[in-house]
């Protein structure tokens, strides 16, 4: 097999899935059934006991653990049978079950009753896919999903209406928070005329809040009225200081440099349209009178301005800007688990979380308003663990995330096996090459040895021939030296033989004269030629002729016989 494809298995390729189980089982040293059982043990809690599930549901589902393991161990394709009632039940648990609580409403009671009935039928249904129990489980799951969908639709409608009604209040609260933050930044804790505190809160604060609400979060900071007061407030916070230890001349000079420009800016602000022009004009007049009294050194009833308050719960947690920024990243519709003193841990949905709002609105599973928190308070809850996000998943996502490393491990094993096979083939080819080279080297060595042997034999034969020729030459030389006139020789020539007789030996010139059997001259040769002809076998001695003394004696005997 080339490689395992996760998408193909999820699309229903059971054959590939079976090979995957076999490969993984082999890697872990288990049988296929044992491996699938171990897999089911790991998947039970993520699939059927998800995070956030109520304790009552867990109590009903936990006894199914062993049956779940056995079902997955015996059915290799169960993990990709997405329409199986077990996965549909897991879908209900992750989508609706984690939001369920044993409340007194009808939907909650019906859901609990269906879960109880399903858990009673499940062991038989898991063991026998075609049983009546399996049909009952399918019916129960179908009803659970229908109840969940209807409840979710009603809750979504209620949430939408609630958000519409709460949005204006939350925008007003958000505007108040921003204005109070601006005023406290420059005036809180600084001496301020007591007579101006109430107009400050009722008029100036109201006008700035109105500006935010009418211009929107993105535009109010560039409005002329807002930018003008952003410039005036830092100066206003310094105008009523009465530091007795400071240099009087220097303090007077500061007042003269601050108040006149401030009066001009106040005059400019009157030309800008406001929500209540009469009230704002009266506020500016009162502020002008107190500023003039301050520059004239008249006695003013002042006290440090107490920080203007916005309802917010105190928290001991350290709230960093980054934490508040993370809170803004949560999307409306996200679910959280909050631990509340009167209700325990329950799921709540973030219904409103907008950048232009300072509060976050949460609703319960029925779409009813649960509580609203300012963002700092909500961030504190998340930082301290009082609240935590509820990540709802689908069974397919869980199975996919679980199978991805399994597929990767199996593919790695396949690649390793392919590499090993490739290396083995390469090693075998190399071994064959080395063996061929060795055989060729051995053949060359044998050929060289044979050639050397042939050369040695040829040299030996040549030496033998040389020795033979030398011996023949010596023998021929001895034979020639022993020749006597009258010796008969046999001449071998052209496959014929002829008898010849040595007739004359001319020792002085080294010549020999031969005659044939009719005493006709046959040949004349030198001593060296005669030796060569004896050596090569052209001549052979038949018998020696008589020496001179024997010839003389023979002649004498012949003469005697004649005289007698």
Image (cartoon, rainbow, N blue to C red):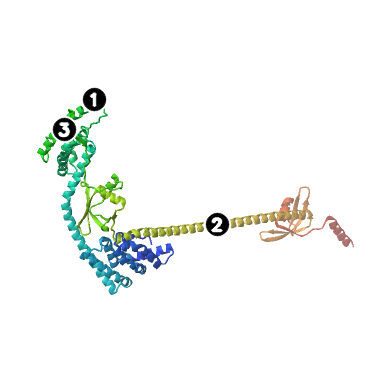
Read off the residue under disc 1.
Answer: 249
Residue 58 placement (x, y as % from top left): 31, 64
**Identity of the residue drawn at 78% across and 47% down:** 508
Residue labelled with disc 2: 438
Q: List the single residue furthest toward the left.
A: 278
What is the CA distance from the residue labelled 3 to the residue labelled 1? 21 Å
Residue density around tag 3, few if under 14, some if 14–19, many if 20 or more, within 10 Å: many
Q: Nearer the viewer, residue 63 or 534?
A: 63
Q: Nearer the viewer, residue 261 or 478?
A: 261
Task: Count residues near mark 2 (Cα–Cα under 10 Å), then give few for <14, some for 14-19, many for 20+.
Answer: few
Q: Disc 2 or 1, which lies upstream in sequence?
A: 1
Seen in the picture, residue 535 relative to 320 is either above or below; the reply is below
- In the image, 551: left or right of 310? right
Dot 1: element: helix
Mark 3 / mark 1, whichever is N-terminal:
1
Q: Quadrant of the C terminus?
A: bottom right
Left or right: 140 in relation to 64: left
Percent coordinates x, y for residue 421 in the rendering = 45, 59
Sort mark 1 into few (<14), some (14-19) or many (20+) by Cα contacts within 10 Å.
Answer: few
- From the top left corner, tell me how far across and down residue 532 is, in percent: 71, 53
Query: In this rendering, does residue 266 appear at all?
Result: yes
Q: Are marks 2 and 3 in contact (CB under 8 Å)?
A: no
Q: In the drawing, does residue 274 fall left or right of residue 90? A: left
Between 135 and 494, the one lying in front of the other is: 135
SS for dot 3? helix
Q: Position of residue 431 (x, y in %)?
A: 51, 58
Measure the C-alpha gap from mark 2 to mark 1.
113 Å
């Amino acid at each position: 097999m080339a490689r395992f494809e996760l998408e193909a298995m999820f699309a229903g390729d059971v054959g590939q899935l079976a090979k995957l189980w076999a490969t993984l089982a082999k890697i872990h040293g288990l049988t296929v059934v044992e491996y699938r059982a171990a897999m089911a043990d790991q998947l039970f809690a993520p699939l059927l006991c998800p995070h956030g599930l109520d304790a009552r549901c867990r109590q009903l589902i936990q006894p199914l653990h062993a049956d779940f393991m056995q079902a997955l161990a015996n059915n290799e394709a169960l993990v990709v049978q997405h329409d199986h009632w077990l996965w549909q039940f897991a879908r209900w648990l992750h989508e609706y079950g984690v939001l369920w609580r044993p409340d007194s409403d009808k939907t909650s009671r019906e859901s609990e009753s269906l879960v109880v009935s399903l858990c009673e039928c499940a062991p038989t249904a898991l063991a026998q896919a075609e049983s009546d129990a399996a049909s009952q489980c399918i019916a129960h799951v179908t009803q659970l999903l229908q109840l969940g969908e209807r409840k979710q639709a009603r809750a979504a409608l209620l949430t939408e209406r609630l958000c519409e009604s709460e949005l204006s209040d939350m925008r007003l609260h958000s505007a108040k928070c921003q204005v109070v933050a601006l005023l406290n930044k420059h005036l809180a804790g600084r001496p301020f005329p007591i007579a101006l505190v109430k107009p400050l809160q009722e008029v100036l604060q109201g006008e700035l809040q109105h500006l935010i609400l009418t211009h929107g979060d993105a535009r109010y900071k560039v409005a002329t009225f807002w930018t003008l007061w952003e410039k005036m407030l830092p100066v206003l916070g310094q105008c009523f200081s009465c530091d007795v230890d400071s240099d009087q001349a220097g303090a007077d000079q500061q007042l003269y440099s601050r108040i006149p420009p401030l009066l001009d800016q106040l005059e400019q602000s009157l030309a800008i349209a406001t929500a209540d022009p009469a009230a704002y004009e009266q506020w500016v007049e009162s502020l002008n009178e107190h500023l003039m009294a301050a520059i004239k050194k008249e006695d003013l009833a002042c006290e440090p301005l107490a920080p203007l308050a916005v309802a917010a719960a105190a928290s001991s947690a350290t709230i960093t800007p980054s934490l508040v920024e993370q809170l803004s990243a949560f999307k409306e519709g996200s679910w959280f688990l909050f631990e509340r003193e009167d209700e325990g841990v329950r799921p709540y949905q973030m219904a409103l979380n907008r950048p232009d709002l300072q509060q976050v609105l949460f609703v319960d599973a029925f779409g009813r308003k649960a509580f609203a928190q300012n963002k700092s308070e909500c961030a504190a809850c998340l930082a301290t663990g009082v609240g935590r996000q509820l990540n709802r998943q689908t069974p397919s996502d869980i199975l996919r995330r679980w199978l991805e490393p399994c597929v990767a491990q199996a593919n790695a094993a396949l690649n390793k096996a392919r590499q090993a096979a490739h290396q083995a083939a390469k090693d075998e080819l190399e071994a064959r090459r080395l063996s061929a080279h060795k055989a060729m080297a051995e053949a060359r060595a044998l050929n060289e040895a044979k050639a050397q042997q042939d050369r040695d034999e040829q040299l030996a034969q040549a030496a033998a021939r040389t020795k033979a020729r030398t011996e023949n030459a010596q023998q021929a030389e001895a034979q020639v030296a022993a020749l006597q006139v009258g010796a008969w020789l046999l001449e071998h020539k052209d496959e014929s033989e002829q008898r010849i007789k040595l007739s004359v030996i001319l020792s002085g010139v080294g010549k020999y004269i031969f005659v044939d059997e009719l005493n006709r001259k046959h040949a004349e040769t030198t001593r060296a030629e005669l030796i060569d002809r004896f050596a090569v076998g052209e001549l052979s001695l038949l018998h020696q002729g008589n020496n001179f003394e024997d010839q003389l004696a023979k002649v004498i005997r012949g003469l005697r016989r004649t005289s007698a």
